[in-house]
Image (spheres, rainbow, N blue to C red):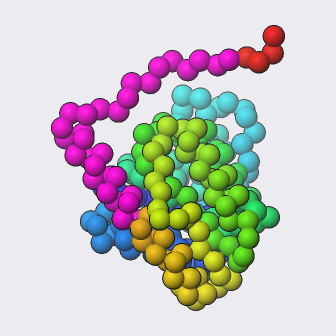
Amino acid sequence: MKVILVNGSPKEKGCTYTALTEAANALNANGIDTEIFWVGTKPVIGCTGCGACAGKGKCVFDDDTVNEFIEKAADADGFIFGSPVHYAAASGALTSFLDRAFYAGGAHLRNKPGASVVSCRRGGASAAFDQLNKYMTISGMPVVSSQYWNQVHGSTPDEVRQDLEGMQTMRTLGNNMAWLLKCIDAGKKAGVTVPEREPVVRTSFIR
């Protein structure tokens, strides 16, 4: 089993990476393979709603890391999305990345456990955390929790490592993710299948 941890920070080895690494180490200790996937610093275009991805499983824009992630997501069993807090929200790059990744590659994410992690100096963490969780709750993904909101505090990786409660929260998240993945695997082996999805009903509020 494998979990992809998406680093949505412009800093490849910064505070968000430090938090994700702590969760990854806990997953590894439980026998789960991990990969930290960096969104990078190249501009990530936002979704234009062109619809060209319909039935293709990939985004029409192919000059950033979105389609690379979608390909990897097909073989992954779980996901953790990490972001620094910018103006009480997830980073702009990660927001554009997730808009397109979920819209074009949602079939590779549905029914797989997911979680979000945020890193901030002081405030805005809960708002950014809530924003990221919404991607999963609209996509049929079981959301993995921890012992507190999944956040760490600090301006540098060293300061983040001094946030002992935050680091423990990351380890607990990794342990909980591993437990749920093993439960799902045991269920599959026992013949439990994912719920059959009904045809989508769209209600118009314009009368």
Q: Quadrant of residue 166?
A: bottom right
Q: Which residues are magenta?
A: 174-203
Could you tell me residue 117's position as x and y percent? 56, 63
Residue at x 73% of width, y 34% of height: 49
Residue 108 visible to an observer of this rendering:
no
- Which is nearer the eye, 3 or 196? 196
Q: Up-down: is 144 above or below 164?
A: above
Q: Up-down: is 198 above or below 190?
A: above
Could you tell me residue 28's position as x and y percent? 33, 69
* Residue, far left: 190
Q: Is residue 55 magenta?
A: no
Q: Up-down: is 114 above or below 157?
A: above
Could you tell me residue 44's position as x and y percent? 70, 56
Image quarter of the N terminus? bottom left
Residue at x 67% of width, y 61% of height: 126
Residue 155 visible to an observer of this rendering:
yes
Classify residue 8 as left or right of residue 111: right
* Residue, far top: 207
- Which is nearer the eye, 50 or 17? 17
Q: Quadrant of residue 11?
A: bottom right
Residue at x 30% of width, y 72% of height: 29
